[in-house]
Amino acid sequence: MNRPLHTLGVPPNAWAVNDAIADLTRPPQTPVPITLATETKTLRLDLTKTAILVIDMQNDFCHPDGWLAHIGVDVSPAREPINPLKTLLPKLRTANVPVLWVNWGNRPDLLNISPGLRHVYNPTGEGVGLGDPLPKNGAPVLMAGSWAAAVVDELEQKPEDIRIDKYRMSAFWDTPLDSILRNLSKTTLFFAGVNIDQCVLATLLDANFLGYDCILVKDCAATTSPDYCFKATIYNVNQCFGFVTDSSSILSSLAL
């Protein structure tokens, strides 16, 4: 008598088991290849192995009532990725490419945040730093579950999207991001969000060091830093850490 097999795990990283059998073969996914133009090479990649990370497109960094604006930063550059992302993300979802929203969202007690990290956001100790309420609306700065850590309203999140709180400029430190990507068998990552020279770059660097294929989507990423920081990031990604493309090139590849 054949006893039914039950799935353990998140496909494609799943076993089929019953009381007598554990099938570890993990049936392969049918590849969905595309050809993508980048600034340095033409890539062939498999959409079944691809995901996009949208980093820190949240109120504290992109909204005129958020923390960056409160300390006097012009956040209009940080809002530039909104429109291209509004066009690109639905197309990627249609192609079954997971969208991962990676937002800075600290624990309320800040127990995993070092003094050095807190100093970056409150160098005098007298200002509005991590966890402190914003004067305009009382939202605690970069706190998980708060308005401050929420994705800006202009970018729609879908139930199938994946949400990850991060606590450093790199989204791989002290988070489940690497485990999630490996369970989903994703090896090629698109990178978007803010700031391109800080949290986006730090996350991309760690992804490169961990063995992921890294593709920076330059019109879906931006920075409130001086323009030379943007240019240096593009140069270094092209030179050392991956590839650089734009959303129109991705959309063209998906349309073929």
Image (tube, rainbow, N blue to C red):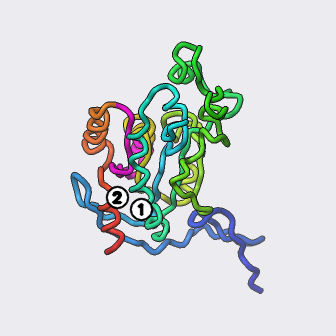
Q: Say above or below: 69 vs 210.
A: above
The answer to whether marks 1 and 2 mark residues whose Cβ atoms lie closer than 8 Å is yes
In the rendering, at what x and y percent does residue 241 appear? Answer: 32, 43
- In front of the other: 42 or 94: 94
The structure residue drawn at horizontal position 74% and vertical position 79%, both measured from the top left corner, is 4
- In front of the other: 51 or 3: 51
Q: Which residues are magenta?
A: 204-225
Residue denoted by label 2: 247
Q: Say above or below: 119 vs 221.
A: above
Q: Say above or below: 40 vs 62.
A: below
Residue extending farthest to the left is 40
Crowd tier of the residue under label 2, counting other residues whose Cα lies within 10 Å: few below 14, some 14–19, many 20 or above: some
Q: Amino acid at mark 2?
A: Ser
Q: Amino acid at mark 1?
A: Thr
Q: Where, quadrant-wise, is the C terminus in this rendering?
A: bottom left
Residue denoted by label 1: 87
